[in-house]
Image (cartoon, grey):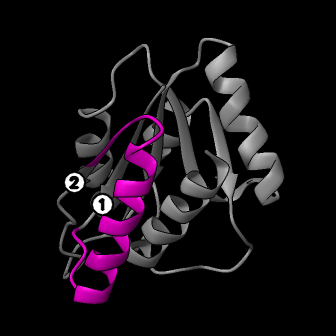
Amino acid sequence: MKITIVAVGKLKEEYLKKAAARFSDEISRHCGFSVLEVPDESTENRPPDSVKLSEGEGILKRIRPEQYVVALAIDGKYRTSDDFAAFLKDCGRSGRDDLVFVIGGSLGLSPEVLKRANEKLSFSPMTFPHQLMRIMLMEQIARGL
């Protein structure tokens, strides 16, 4: 199995970088793993839809047609940690073994990215910083594998 996270923005704080490195090492022991970063666009003097469109174009350029895409979105499906682990195992068994998880920027994901997604996943009805969301997703992937 191969798992890729496509995320808008870079991790800036050192403690987040350390957490990401730890979980990356843990995940990599079980499968191929990579994180692809898309530059976050400036929101200054730009309509939110324009920002999401630009970030969305960057995201879509990093996704191949054969990949199974899970977009993190507030209106996505909720899963327990056990359900998420079962989802990962099922993907490996059913041929969906090239997974891409997409994390948008501060304004969320463009409609085009959401349309490309095979499914949407939500961790909570709350909004989290996208940098922290990356760590939370990596922790759940590591736990699930």
- Residue 110 visible in image: no
Depth check, front residue: 50 or 92: 92
- List x then y, in percent, for residue 110: 43, 50
- State the count of labels: 2
Check disc 1 and give the amino acid type: Val
Q: Secondary structure at mark 2?
A: strand
Residue located at (22% from left, 66% from top) = 40
Separation (CA) of disc 1 from disc 2: 5 Å
Which residue carries the number 1 mark? 8
Q: Is residue 140 left or right of residue 17?
A: right
- List x then y, in percent, for residue 106: 40, 74
* Vertical position of residue 96 compared to residue 6: above or below: above
Which numbered disc, 1 or 2, marks the residue that appears first in the sequence?
A: 1
Q: Secondary structure at mark 1?
A: strand
Residue located at (19% from left, 80% from top) = 45
Q: Is residue 26 left or right of residue 36?
A: right
Q: Does 4 lie within the magenta span?
A: no
Which residue carries the number 2 mark? 38
Residue located at (63% from left, 57% from top) = 143
- Residue 27 visible in image: yes
Q: Is residue 134 left or right of residue 20?
A: right
- Residue range in magenta is 10-35
